[in-house]
Image (tube, coloured by chain):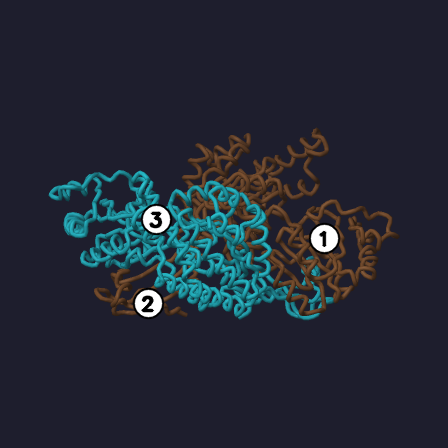
Chain colours: A brown, B cyan
């Protein structure tokens, strides 16, 4: 069966607009469900994934076979990297992990219906009314999410689980390489939704690159776009839609080694921040060293870099101080996100200069200071404008799982709505619920106006 | 002195980009100030306004004189309405109110530095570390706000106060009619900032319609745009910027009179929601009546409308039921925001039909149900997707002051970031602050991984 035929069997009969409208209708139903019903559907999804193992693995094997065949004929620049191929591939162990992840999302606290504020606006006694007037702020679903992602099968199950848990419908646009796998996964997950008496259109596959622009134009039907992929993908999405975008295009993270840093601690933290997972957005790209420490510290850092295969780039002072190290080219561009074992090194005259450098060249993702000087640390944490700021800890901790959110939709460098690692809370909005007994605004104005009580409720 | 010359004297030397860059620099300084310093500056602003009374009133008198002169020559459609002229005019009493409003913003709780979450990620004992690893989520300023508003002098002082209180710099683009007043006000407020040793560029006037598009293009320098004015202004801003926009273009609010409504209560609430301030965005535009109640209720509602001068528009059933009332034209368009004493009336077959109508035609601003049936009320409050939902209360309560927020930036119908009446909290974002003792991510992976503790702190 071709991917297109498979997709048609799943859902994709009709225009992108029809799919989005159906998702909108499904989202209205989802918003009315209680937590137990949503969690039961997540359990049904996990069970269905495990039950459909052979079919899912066969679809994935076909995606992998085609990707490998394409790689054999493509010029090197266009081939999928070994890392991407590895992420594309499913096996029984991976499938069990995916099902376990769905169950772990079910186990998280319910993000909906939380009372975020409650204020008594007036007590009993307003003329012609019964009882008092109360306001409550409740968490509610956003509505419809459009998620555009690349070649990762586990993205399908993770997004489906997070969307359902937070009462949102999701339109999923997978990368071309994972289309067969995604189609099979969505078919299985929609079956589980139907079995749990939930609307199947809560989860809809959207195939074809040309449908991306259609999705991005539907700001009346889609409440949030989540691009998960390359910087180019995120920037394309940001530039082509009026729908709010959750995500980040860049992670140019800095570590500032202060004058009062503990050198041994600094070397351990930098090593971790660069090598723990160099392709991650929270890996460090630039290390700034206070000039009073530079002559002593930089040779030790260079030794570490040489030992771990980290390619260094330096400013003029770094190059001068490391003149015995043969290969320290000049820093091209302080904005580079290497995504691999490379590091920009700079010397700064002060904490202020470090902060200024970070504001000029950082992406406001994650920035760290290493120092034993508590006052310097607090100034850095207070003044640096970024989603996460760290003292004496690796930038790699900026992550929803590590922060204790249980699951992560992505990391936002936008200042609006959700900033930093985003868990289920970022997939909700709020509404104000007012309960009265015939209260009218006119009672609270004029010469004999009643006064609001505005008592915050516990 | 011409408005242009005055503006130059205030600040506007240089390009819009230079002004925005200076605002960005000022915002960095503001973010480091404590609450006492920001409140002292607000006090200085209030005192300076009162001290500069004659100068401010003279500038305003000139704006009013020119507006009236222009009105005398303009065709009727282009004239400023009497209501707009009234809002433009300042007098000593109005100036005192403006200063009092600045002081009341100073008295509000500090929106910055609030600890919104705190989680221990790990206790002491990780290898090569001192102490534990803790994460805290803090409220911080957004940065730079661009506020585009119409002919209201009090908008200048209110926005300046809210921005400073929340640690944000503001670029103010006033309507042409209020340019002289705004220029004089900003000069006085900047003087107060300087006196309080705060950066003057925290508050900058931007004059000239051509600068609006320049502002809207500066998404690297401006963090939020707040359009305060007509639907046309808001829609223009939304369509021409990638900067997040806080506000709402429309307030098409509904009241649903349920089968189990108390008719007397319903009439009082509808009267208030329509007549308390008909131009407000939270005034009701459409009343939907359950069909079982329609024959009895609609004539009483018509009597109220005739007595209060409210022009009715009806669907076919309403027109039939009100055939004895001579003037009930058909509803043109359920999307109309009348902004005056007009009302669309419809009959619906059920609660579900009312909810469907509201989702199809509402602007998700404020929607109310009037009923004595608690289950129907809860269903409506739960299922209707809007910024504010009300039971047995007037839609007019959807307002930052009435909700107890002390001051209001505006009302947002966006689902992202801030929804409904927005107080100071909507002018903040968050950052995650992590404090460690040399912690590295690698300690938490692999076969001898440490476990995160993830203990939420009180």
| Chain ID of residue with mark 1 | A
Q: Residues within 10 Å of mark 2 (few under 14, many from 20)?
A: some
State the image coordinates of residue B125 (x, y, percent, origin top left). Answer: 69, 70
Left or right, A84 with reference to A349: left
Q: Is residue A375 visible?
A: yes
- For mark 3, give the secondary structure: loop
Residue at the disc numbered 2: A452
| Residue placed most toward the observer, B402 or A389 | B402
Q: Residues within 10 Å of mark 1 (few under 14, many from 20)?
A: many
| Residue placed most toward the observer, B334 or B21 | B21
Tell me how far mark 3 sits from mark 1, CA to CA: 48 Å
Residue in the image at 65% along x and 69% along y: B132
The label on residue B251 is 3
Residue at the disc numbered 1: A286
Nearest-to-viewer mark from 1 and 2: 2
Contact (CB < 8 A) between labels 3 and 2? no
- For mark 2, give the secondary structure: loop
State the image coordinates of residue A408 (x, y, percent, origin top left). Answer: 56, 53
């Amino acid at each position: 069966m071709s991917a297109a035929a498979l997709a048609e069997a799943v859902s994709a009969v009709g225009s992108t607009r029809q799919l989005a409208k159906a998702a909108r209708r499904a989202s209205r139903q989802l918003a009315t469900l209680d937590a137990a019903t949503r969690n039961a559907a997540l359990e049904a999804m996990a069970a269905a994934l495990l039950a459909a193992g052979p079919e899912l693995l066969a679809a994935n094997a076909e995606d992998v076979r085609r990707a490998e065949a394409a790689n054999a004929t493509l010029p090197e620049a266009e081939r999928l990297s070994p890392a991407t191929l590895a992420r594309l591939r499913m096996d029984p162990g991976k499938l069990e992990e995916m099902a376990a992840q769905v169950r772990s999302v079910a186990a998280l606290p319910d993000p909906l219906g939380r009372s975020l504020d409650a204020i008594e606006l007036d007590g009993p006694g307003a003329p012609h009314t019964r009882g008092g007037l109360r306001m409550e702020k409740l968490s509610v679903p956003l509505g419809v999410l459009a998620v555009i992602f690349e070649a990762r099968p586990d993205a399908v199950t993770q997004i489906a689980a997070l969307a359902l848990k937070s009462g949102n419908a999701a339109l999923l646009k997978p990368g071309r390489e994972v289309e067969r796998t995604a189609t099979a996964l969505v078919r299985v997950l929609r079956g589980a939704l139907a079995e749990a008496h939930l609307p199947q259109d809560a989860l809809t596959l959207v195939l074809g690159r040309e449908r991306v622009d259609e999705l991005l134009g539907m700001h009346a039907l889609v409440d949030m776009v989540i691009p998960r992929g390359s910087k180019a993908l995120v920037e394309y999405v940001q530039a082509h839609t009026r729908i709010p975008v959750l995500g980040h295009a860049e992670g140019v993270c800095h570590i500032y080694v202060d004058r009062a840093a503990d050198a041994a601690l600094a070397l351990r933290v930098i090593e971790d921040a660069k090598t723990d997972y160099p392709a991650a957005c929270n890996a460090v790209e630039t290390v700034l060293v206070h000039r009073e420490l530079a002559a002593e510290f930089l040779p030790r850092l260079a030794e570490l870099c040489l030992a771990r295969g980290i390619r260094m780039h330096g400013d003029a002072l770094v190059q001068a101080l490391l003149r015995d190290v043969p290969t320290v080219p000049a820093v091209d561009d302080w904005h580079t996100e290497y995504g691999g074992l490379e590091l920009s090194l700079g010397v700064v005259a002060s904490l202020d200069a470090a902060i200024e450098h970070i504001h000029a060249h950082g992406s406001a993702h994650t920035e760290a200071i290493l120092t034993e000087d508590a006052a310097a640390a607090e100034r850095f944490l207070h003044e640096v404008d970024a989603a996460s700021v760290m003292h004496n800890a690796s930038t790699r901790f900026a992550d929803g799982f590590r922060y204790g959110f249980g699951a992560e939709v992505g990391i936002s460098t936008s200042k609006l709505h959700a900033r930093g690692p985003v868990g289920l809370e970022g997939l909700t909005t709020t509404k104000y619920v007012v309960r009265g007994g015939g209260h009218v605004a006119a009672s609270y104005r004029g010469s004999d106006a009643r006064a609001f009580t505005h008592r915050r409720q516990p």
